[in-house]
Amino acid sequence: MMSAFIVVNLRGTINQNSSVKTTLHHLHLESRFRATIIPDTPISKGMLQTVKNHVAWTNADSSIIESLITTRGEKSNSIKYDADLAKEDGYTNIADLAKALSEAKINLSSISNLKPSFRLSPPKGGFRKSTRRMYAQGGTLGYNPDLPKLISNMI
C-alpha cells in the first residue's frame, strides 16, 4: 500500500537556485507557508531531496489532511472547499477524500474543485526550532515527524 507525504515550504524565495525554484513550482509550493500532499514515489522522494533545505515533510495522516481541507481548502480565492464540492468530485464526504489522499490513491491535482496547495499562516507561538537547520541537527527542515503539531498551529 502506498502512502503520501505532507510537504510545507518554510523558507522564502529570495536567492534560490534555479533547480530549487523549478522543483518548488512543480510541487505547487512557490511561496512561504504553502502546504501540499504528494504520493510516496521515487520521483517525489528525489524532488524532496532537491528542496530539502527549504521544506519540511512528514507522512500524511488522514485526520491532518481532513483538517487542512476543511479549514484551508479552496476552489478559488473566494470559494472554500466544502462537502458539496467533495460530492461533485465523487466522494461522500471530506473524510473519504482525506483517506484517499493519505493512501495516495489520488493526487491533489486530479481533484477538479480543489487547489493543489493550501495557504497556511505562520505558526501560533512561533517556531520552537530553527527553520534553517535540518531536523537531525535540531531544526525543522527535511523529514520531520513533529510536523503535524506545527501544521495544526499553522491552520
Image (cartoon, rainbow, N blue to C red):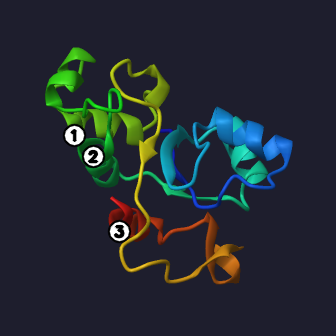
Residue 32 is left or right of residue 82, and the answer is right
Residue sitting at x 32%, y 34% = 74
Residue 123 spot, x, y in % from top left = 41, 69
Q: Is 143 situated above or below 120?
A: below
Q: How far separated are the C-alphas under marks 1 and 3?
A: 21 Å
Split into 4 quadrants, where in the image is the C terminus?
bottom left
Q: In terms of sequence position, does the residue under pointer 1 or pointer 3 come before the other? A: 1
Q: Residue at x 39, y 36 (%)?
A: 101
Disc with the residue nearer the chain's start (3 vs 2) = 2
Mark identifier at residue 95: 1
| Mark sitting on residue 153 | 3
Q: Mark 3 or mark 2: which is in front?
A: 3
Circle 2: residue type: Glu
| Quarter residue 105 falls in | top left
Residue at 65%, 57% in the rendered image:
12
- Judge from the rendering whether residue 38 lies leftward or rightward of residue 84; answer left or right: right
Residue 45, image x, y percentages: 69, 46
Q: What residue did someone put label 2 on? A: 66
Amino acid type at mark 1: Ala
Which-is-in-front pick, marks 1 and 3? 3
Task: Say whether marks 1 and 3 touch (CB < 8 Å).
Answer: no
The CA distance from mark 3 to mark 2 is 15 Å
**Residue 31 in view (yes/no):** yes
